[in-house]
Amino acid sequence: MRSMLAATLVIAGLTGAAAQTTPPPSGAVPGVKPKPVATTPVRPALQTPGETATAMSQAERQAIQSDLAWTGAYNGVIDGQPSDRMVAAIKAFQKDHGAKPTGVLNPQERAQLAEASRKLQGNVGWKLVSDPVTGARLGIPAKLVPQQSSDANGTKWTSATGTIQIMLARRKEAGVTTAKLADQEKKEAGRQVSYSAVKPDFFVLSGTQGLKKFYIRGAFKDAEVRILTILYDQATEGTMEPVVIVMSSAFNPFPTGALAGPPPRKKVEYSTGAIVSDDGAILADREAVDGCVSIVVAGHGNADLGATDKEHDLALLRIYGARGLKPLALGAAKPPATVDLVGIADPQSQGGGAAVSVARAGVTPVGSNGGLALSPPPGLGFSGAPARDADGKFAGLTLLRPPQVAGPANAAIATQATLVDADTVRKFLASADVKPTPDAGTDAKASVVRLICVRK
């Protein structure tokens, strides 16, 4: 585009120069300005949704596919490859949320999709695990199948009543092919196969088995067969369908190299804390201070972990003997369309410094349960940063989370950001017997501190 624009400017310049040196046309009256000729500008062709998807990184496409699968809009392979199915799923998501179905997610819609996916994953307890028996990598809805048992032949996860069963089995079998394996599974008693796909390196079957629905994905390597089987009551279909789609892409029977999933917790993690009382109460992101051997408040020393709220990921820290603390003003404010996040970025992003900075983000409601997504997400270190509206009133607390993406790991994916609204924060503080200081200041920069979590 730049080269085309440059060429256009060069041609325009040459044309202008020629116009200056060319004598007036025959018949022109000297001193009389000729009438302008109306022209229609030629606009460059707009980029299609497919072209926009192709221009993204594979990791970002994969993250979008994964999030769309969780919302039920996408039922394809989560591999980060651009496709018409992915564009159609984006349009379906946009239409379901009252937006124009363009096939291209704007920043607010992308944040809304990410937050919707995160909540759905949380509802089922989604996590990526390595099977203790085979070493295979798979995703498990841990809240739905809390019971686990293993033997030499594999591992089984089940719900308390057996309505959902997930089985990972292995066996030795020489001279095998995926077609042969698929035929063997089809002959299982009571199975009615409605879908079958047999590839050289894997096979997939789905259908009904008695009163349950089933999904099977299998593969082999060096005469070892590994098969994932998912059985679930038809009454749970609404919950399980998106789970099955992401489980299929997350399943890696013979993993090598990088694996999808959240990065390991850092041994030293930096976040932001908000001082909420003059006697040493500090509001923090619960996950940022989880599993710490010690929590250090920069400039004040060690802090104790007090009350926590696992549902909203809030935590309360306490420091003792500190003087001159300036609590954050917690006046009432409804979540606005735009907020200023006041935090302390990770020292690596500011040359080892500890300066307080402000990042602006848009707020997008997600779902019907009050979820709020922030876009663009602030940098590392801002988890726990207070948000303020245009009038300087407290609007909520920032949380940063790494996304969990089904499928093979390709590259780093942008962190997702959400906002815990001000009312939820105030209720949490009230339950912990923290009363906002009446004369709290309005300078939020003076009310934030750097938190340092040290883990083993």
Image: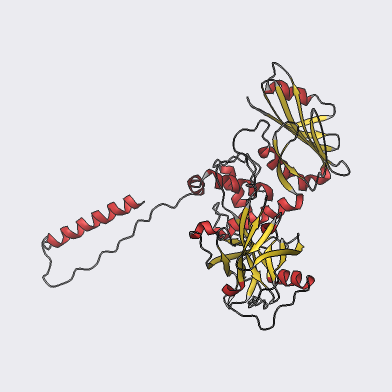
**Image x and y of residue 86, in percent:** 58, 45
Q: Residue drawn 59% across and 58% down?
A: 109
Left or right side of 323 for 429: right
Q: Residue drawn 61% across and 73% down?
A: 447
Q: Locate residue 112: give its quadrant.
A: bottom right
**Image x and y of residue 91, in percent:** 59, 52
- In the displayed structure, 398 sits above or below 276; it is above
Left or right side of 275 for 61: left
- In the displayed structure, 170 sits above or below 105; it is above
- In the image shown, does 204 or 265 lie closer to the viewer? 265
- In the displayed structure, 192 sits above or below 398; it is above
| Residue 140 visible to an observer of this rendering | yes
Find the residue positioned furthest to the top.
Answer: 175
Left or right side of 120 for 144: right
**Image x and y of residue 210, in percent:** 86, 34
Q: Residue drawn 74% across and 21% down?
A: 172
- In the displayed structure, 225 sits above or below 31; it is above
